[in-house]
Image (cartoon, rainbow, N blue to C red):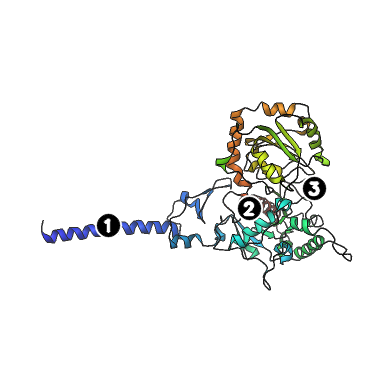
Amino acid sequence: MSEKSMVASRFIFCVIVVSMFLLILSSVFLLQFSSDHSLIPRSVLELILVNNTLLYFNPNFKREQVMLPPFPSGDQIRQRIMVPCDPTRALLRVFMYDLPPEFHFGILGWKGSENQKWPNVDDPKRIPAYPGGLNLQHSPEYWLTLDLLASNTPEVHRPCTAVRVQNSSKADVIFVPFFSSLSYNRNSKIKGNNDLVSVNKELQDKLVEFLMGQKEWKRSGGKDHLVIAHHPNSLLDARRKLGSAILVLADFGRYPVEIANVKKDVIAPYKHLVHTIPRAESSSYEERPTLLYFQGAIYRKDGGIIRQELYYLLKNEKDVHFAFGTIKGKGIHEASQGMALSKFCLNIAGDTPSSNRLFDAIASHCVPVIISDEIELPFEDALDYSEFCIFVRASDAVREGYLLNLLRLIKRETWTKMWERLKEITLHFEYQYPSQPGDAVNMIWQEVAHKVSSVRFDWHRKKRYHRS
């Protein structure tokens, strides 16, 4: 072959290699960065990549969320991840009222600069801390507010499930950022001799007056508003006036059905107080010597009277731990150890149908035994609790020998299957900042989206006919 032919061949080879490289590079660029999806198949459109999270939309509008493997390193890709949530791709667009700090982070003692209504949330280590102890179990208001603030903060990596928008007409739901549970816990007592009402009641009165004057409330009668009242005694003075809103509650125990019901409202989990056991460290059947565990307040009123009856039935059983306990001192540490070494953990109705104990058991991978006939459970449209919980009617539980016989008949294989399922669903009950795919914050937003859809359906039906 002549020298000229060899040069030509090498040139053609180089052109082919460069062309293939450019073709591959342009294809990747088109798929990851193009805003024009007309060339992408419909099946691919169902997968939306947001902040290192893959959101899959299935036909019943529920989102199954899984973490993708870590992105390759590189400045371009990191910049891609740092882009704020796109409201057009979020499941829920949320307008949040700019209430003064006295309604939210001010209750935590946070003080911003002049005219600053919200703390900076770009650094998780510097956000205002929520008080511990029993206060913490009723803290969904705090986590949801932080999550909305973070939705417009590029530095915070979170799933783009809910995003804050500045125009209420573009919103699916109107969020009311009042830390009502914390206000009840901290501001309910009348402190001064000259004070006629508590700070908590004053805040509720101010909130009602504010909301009733807003065009957003007048437009829907409050039906598209989201109000959090997780503590059973929160919003006692305002709840009737705000009852048309979507409420986020622990249960319906202290609400009349016309104010709170499963059709319009959301049940949110308590924030558990014990530490979550890592999956790899969770004790198996043989490593849990205690059959049944309960530690807490025994003498309760109303539906909680059953605790006392069960105490006298079970206290002398050799493989049962049924004892009085509190979170004070080493109470939480003792409960953590006790649940982690028990096969079953009792969740009995107290003053209200629900209690934090259920979520402590889930975090401990201790199969919950629920004795509470009126209980409503978080995310039950998405989770089948019978896969990881035992339900016992109160009338059966107080029959001598019934409960222990039932639990002793559950074979190792059945228990292990429930234990494995517990380890799978624990994340759904974790509150954290920043939020993560499938955690409690993410799940609550999805529940709110379902309720908003139902509210919008009823609203549209009522507007069918023209009104002169």
Looking at the picture, tell me which residue is in the foreground, 337 or 234.
Answer: 337
The percent coordinates of residue 46 (x first, y second) are: 50, 50
Is residue 249 left or right of 424 when viewed as pictured?
Answer: right
Tell which residue pokes out farthest to the front in this image: 329
Q: Which residue is mark 3?
A: 254
Q: CA distance from mark 3 to mark 1?
A: 72 Å
| Residue 204: quarter of image | bottom right
Marking on residue 311:
none
Q: How many marks?
A: 3
Mark 1, Cα crowd under 10 Å, few <14 / some 14-19 / many 20+, is few
Q: Is residue 468 visible?
A: no
Q: Which residue is mark 1?
A: 17
| Residue 148: quarter of image | bottom right
Helix, strand or loop at label 2? It is helix
Give the mark, 3 or 2, whose residue is nearer the N terminus. 3
Helix, strand or loop at label 3? It is loop
Looking at the picture, tell me which residue is in the foreground, 347 or 230.
Answer: 347
